[in-house]
Amino acid sequence: MTGTLTAFAAEIATGAIRVVDLTHTLDPDFPVIILPPEFGQCARFRMEEISAYDHRGPGWKWHNLSLSEHTGTHFDAPSHWISGREVPNGDVDEIAVENFVGPVAVIDCSEGAAQDDDFELTPEIILAWEARHGRIPPDSWVLMRTDWSKRTGAAYLNMRSDGPHSPGPTPEAIRLLVEERDIRGFGTETVGTDAGQGAHYTPPYPAHYILHGAGKYGLQCLHGLDKLPPTGAVLMAAPLKIKGGTGSPLRVLALVPGEST
Amino acid sequence: MTTPLTPPPRKDPLKRTVSPTQPPGIRSRAAHGLTAAAAEGRFALQTCAECGTVQYPPRDACCNCLSVDLPWRDVSPAGTLLAETTVQTSVRLYFRERTPWRVGSVQLDAGPVVICHVHGDVVPNARVHLRNLLDRSGQGVILALPEERTDHMADDPELRAMSSDPHLRRVLITDGRHPFAPDLAAALKAAGATMVFAGEPETWLPNPNRAALEAAGAEILPLDVTDTKSVERMAGEIGGKADILINTARFLRPGGVLARGGTDVARDEMNVNYLGLMRLAQAFGPAMCGRTADGVNSAVAWVNILSVYARTNTPAYGCFNASQAAALSLAQSMRAEFRASGLRVMNVYTGPTEEDWYQPLPPPKVTGTALARSVISGLQQGLEDVWCGDVAKDFNERFRKDPKVLEIELGQEGGE
């Protein structure tokens, strides 16, 4: 076993295994999910200087941060949604750490999302993907690549008078992944695991509702999923250990085969 | 006729910016009544409660009957110019830099003779209209104006030195998303402001005001008062040319303490309404304070738009009002801290405004044009406190009579 890990470290050093960052920079101008104004709102990322080598602390610079559990690239735990409120070990601090490292399947929906802001991931697309790349193994992460992370500013939330418009999965697609493939979790490049118009499905916000009700996890605001192969990569996504936390900003990394292999 | 001001040439970068100096600012306690009245644009003098004598200058006892019961009452500002002279030099630095400076004596119809500043358009022996104005030390002084309006009257150097006129000045509206920002921008332009900047927080969300702001001639710039870096960045860019700053940034939600679950919304209110003001003051304040003697387009005023319920709370918007009270308290500190530079802090108090978050409340409500009118006229008169709309004016009267009674009444209304 020691040999495996040593070889693994060596392959990272040689570039046979590459480490890819799938995280947006925490930035005050990065969008957060917007709910109707009478609901509570997700805090934006903010940073206040405590001192900066000045009279407040001559030799050091540091900041206080404020943000939500669901600001920036972040992890959703089962307890985030009402359907998952009774799930055992449903808070971020309770989840077994083995779940934070694991295989990942990437379904490329970037072409469809480029043509249709409300592009839907359907069971047909999943089955067609499996026909090319094999059945999604149990306990895998499944990521929906849309290249949405390349959008900036107002185009990211894509907010209109009838709400945001961004791609996401249909209830049937999520049911297939959860009930028939028993995935570990589902991730997107958009602001949520659900489509911008996800409130209008039955159930509303099906990805949140079905994933978390079944004790599965979510990842959103992922960056650069075009750098991942459809299969064969390993995802490392460990949320902060927040007592009773329903989610957490985190650094998401992927280990992918290097060019030479 | 006053010689009209002309747009100043661009600043010569080789020339040192003139340091602000101040007219003498020491007053007796008795004289502070004049300043209090000037802050609201009222012409008030000590009026003896026993014999009715109106007296000037303010004293501790009546000059006729020695009574010490001398309330400040609004009196007629009409009078006749008795004598006038033009000061050519002065040992006072402030006046020395501004000579020639006209002064005179006026026989008030109400009784006393007043030594005062005299507008350039007042002719000898003319009937005059006195105004009680704040000078750059923040103290009340009296200026004699012609009875009838004259051309370019506001451009008179003595009047201009005391007002905060937006004419030929550059104005920053901190939050262009405020529902009244387009009305403000349009009114400022109409009042002769050379540039109007409008801040836009969260550029990643649609801004329904964008087209109206652009149509009003405002320049839209990214500025978010909850983000210290954003405020510092904008102060770095335009802090040196913000002559008037109007803080419209505001987070408003209904509800008192028990109607709210938790403190999350109150946090947003404090972050925008209180800390936002502090961030703006720390970033823009020093540059503006340093430019209060910078010629025609010198920095003159800092404007806060506040709910009148900042002074006495009412539970329907209890938590929001508490954040307004915090902002008011901070504004008082800012006013005192800015005073040494001559930068004036003007608070505009409004009742409920005609917008979404006050929709369930009955009229009268303050409209965007009414607010803009109050802001512009307050600046032109150089005021410190402006009561915008009937609700705010009525509130002020009741507050003045008895703050505790007002608190009881507002609490029983259960809302605004």
Image (cartoon, rainbow, N blue to C red):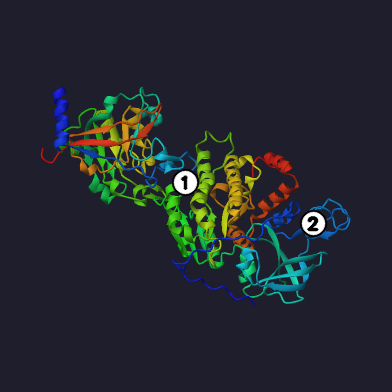
The residue type indicated by label 2 comes to Gln
User: 10 Å neighbourhood of mark 2: few (<14), some, or many (≥20)?
Assistant: many
Please give the chain letter of the residue carrying mark 2: B
The residue type indicated by label 1 comes to Thr
Q: What element carries label 1?
A: loop
Q: Which of marks 1 and 2 is in front?
A: 2
Quarter of the image with the N terminus of chain A is top left
Residue under pointer 2: B46
> Which image quadrant for residue A89?
top left
Q: What element carries label 2?
A: strand
Of labels 1 and 2, earlier in sequence is 2
Q: Residue at x 59, y 64 (%)?
A: B165
Which residue occupies the extreme left position in the image? A260
User: Image height check: is B264 above or below B380?
Assistant: above
Q: Is residue A83 left or right of residue B244?
A: left
Closer to us: A252 or B7: B7
Residue under pointer 1: B226
Which residue occupies the extreme front position in the image? B91
Closer to us: A107 or B251: B251
Whole-percent x, y for residue A7 in the image: 13, 29
Residue A66 shows in this picture: no
Please give the chain letter of the residue carrying mark 1: B
* Numbered circle sitting on residue A136: none
Q: Is residue A208 left or right of residue A258?
A: right
Quarter of the image with the C terminus of chain A is top left
Q: How far apart are marks 1 and 2 (CA)?
A: 45 Å
Q: Residue at x 74, y 73 (%)?
A: B84
Q: Which residue is drawn at 51% across and 71% down?
A: B8
Q: Is residue A204 left or right of residue B385?
A: left
Whole-percent x, y for residue B153 in the image: 64, 72
